[in-house]
Image: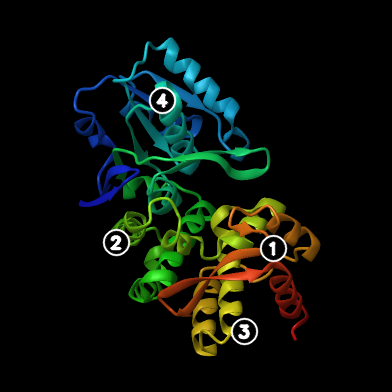
Amino acid sequence: MNEIKCNADTGNSVIYTGEKISSFEKYLKGRKTVVITDKNINRLYGNHFSNYPSVVIGTGEEIKSLATVEYIISELIKNGCDRKTFILGIGGGIVTDITGFASSVFMRGVDFGFVSSTLLSQVDASVGGKNGVNAGTLKNMIGVFRQPEFVICDPEMITTLSDSEYLSGLAEVIKHGFIRNSSLLSFISDNRNLILDKDTAVIEKMVFESVKIKTDVVTEDPKESGLRKILNFGHTFGHAVELINGIPHGHAVAFGMICALKLSHSLNYITEADKNYGINLLKNFGYKEDFNIEESDLFDCLSHDKKKSDDKIDFVLLNKIGNAFIEKIEIKELRRWYNDMCSGS
């Protein structure tokens, strides 16, 4: 097991990579605790927390709403919770996002922590202190910055994921390599077969390296005012494709990263060799290079992107593999480039 500390003005958090779900009680420190989880996790792992009152929610993006938060808070009140109650979210990114938000607004904020059950939540959603819910179809438009007290990342839980869900999380691991650590990409490339076989030692290594990258960025920029925006590499086009096609988050982000690699090359920031290396790495894990999205639908979604300001958007580019930066690009220029890319010109 490894311990990574994330200290920022949004709170202090400790992430335990390689820890087991069966060990969560020692981090509760005897406090009254309520568990928030979903019906799938409750079915698979409910025996680990059967001694604690639980609030069980549904699954899918549609339950990531203020209505679900209101339901959770009503259940906390029914259970006699107060400001000293600890809230433990056990599940994937939707559970951790909702748990963090509900805990932050219940009685103006109670302490909370996570047992993260998916690769995507272990390397992304549960780390960094961003908690929130959707506003209709718009992702994460309502939220707060507040750190969990701790996050447990159990590699054994990852082995129960479907291949699609697993690859969705792997895309975020690859993203961290692109923006900050080319050695992580080399490790991923060299261990492709073990990764696809969900080898727990390899998973633990990837989670540890990813969490280190994210915590370093979050510690320097906890509220996404500057550096933290590089964590959005691949997300500009990715979020739009995810919304339009309803495909898993990581698969959409992988497509977005391919677009960002191509744009970085078109703007002469990276070499053709670097562009091809990155694209081939992604395609080697089965991520798609094209989803046949209508250009009008794509840019209608981009018009609602949180990174947009006036007629420009903060776009994350690479100037080499392992180093990202942010450039403001006019939407009309991005649209022109996208059309040129689609037409092959």
Q: Sequence order check: which comes first, mark 4 or mark 3?
A: 4
The image shows residue 149, relative to residue 212, as above or below, that is: above
User: CA separation, marks 2 and 3?
Assistant: 34 Å
Which mark's residue is nearer the viewer, 1 or 2? 1
Quadrant of image for the C terminus: bottom right
Q: Sequence order check: which comes first, mark 2 or mark 3?
A: 2
What amino acid is labelled 1 in the image? Asp
Mark 4 touches mark 2? (CB < 8 Å): no
Give the residue number, with chain letter if any, for mark 3: 266
Which mark's residue is nearer the viewer, 2 or 3? 3
Query: Where's residue 16, x and y in %?
Result: 25, 47
User: CA separation, marks 3 and 1?
Assistant: 21 Å
Q: Is residue 113 left or right of residue 121?
A: left
- Res 311 label: 1
User: CA separation, marks 4 and 3?
Assistant: 48 Å
Which mark's residue is nearer the viewer, 4 or 2? 4
- Res 205 label: 2
The reply to whether residue 17 is in sight is no
The image shows residue 128, relative to residue 86, as above or below, that is: below
Give the residue number, with chain letter if any, for mark 4: 108
Q: Sequence order check: which comes first, mark 1 or mark 4?
A: 4
